[in-house]
Image (cartoon, rainbow, N blue to C red):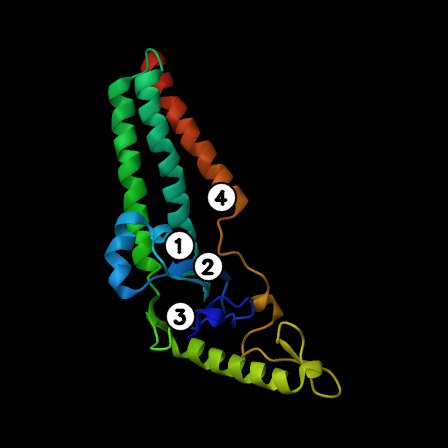
Amino acid sequence: MWPGELANANLPPVCLKTGQPAAGYHTLKLVPPDSWVLTLLLGPFFVPGVRARIPLARRPLTLLSGLMLVRGLSGVLGPACLLAAFYVPGAPRTLLLIAGVLSAGVAYSSYLVYLVQAHMGDVYRSPTGESWVRLRGVHPNFVAAVEAWRAVREAALREPAAYSADLRWHWNGAQWVSTLPAGLNVTNAGPAGGRIAWWQAAAGMLIGWALLGGIPWWRFHG
């Protein structure tokens, strides 16, 4: 697929992995296959690649969001524990050092698992210099949905007044009908978040800071 298609907000809401109706879109970065090791070491932010907005069913979407939450939480707890161990007078240094090292290990482990789960395609460059993406583990339902979506785009170029701006509705002369694949509806195709919900992040941070504060409290009052 072309990078512009993968970044399109109107990409069909069909899970790339399972072929089921998508529960949301997860934005990730795809990199060239020869940059995979470099990505593991430095992270995708420092490696040239293509940003893709991938439609996913609830299970893979929750898995990726959960790994991001674990990485973010443990990435904060690790440095906090280490700073407290060296700069807070009377703090239980050994316990905080252990907690800091464990948190750092969890952060990096969740990062590695996330990269493996998010490795859904590789970026290649054509002889003309254009980038294109070869997706991995693609379900046939996703392929069929993308082909139908491309056909709708071509038809919309010929008759723009007959299609809605998001290409999900077509005016047949009497009423608006959905252009989505069979089994999908407006609810399935509604805006979804490949991001972590605010309440998940807030709950995770509160639990993490409660644990961090509980270590010295238990040490001094236990």
Q: In what quadrant of the picture does the N terminus appear?
A: bottom left
Q: Residue at x 46, y 59 (%)?
A: 26
| Three-letter residue code for mark 1 | Leu
Report x, y in % for residue 23.
50, 62
Vertically, is 163 above or below 198?
below
Residue named by callout 3: 18
Q: Are marks 3 and 4 in contact (CB under 8 Å)?
A: no
Point out the tag, 3 or 1, that comes first from the N-terminus: 3
- Mark number, residue 26: 2
Residue type at mark 3? Thr
Is 47 positioned to the left or the right of 197 in the image?
A: left
Q: Residue at x 71, y 81 (%)?
A: 161
Q: Which residue is mark 1?
A: 64
Label 4 belongs to which residue? Answer: 200
Callout 2 secondary element: strand
Q: Give the alpha-carbon distance from disc 3 to disc 1, as whole Å.
A: 15 Å
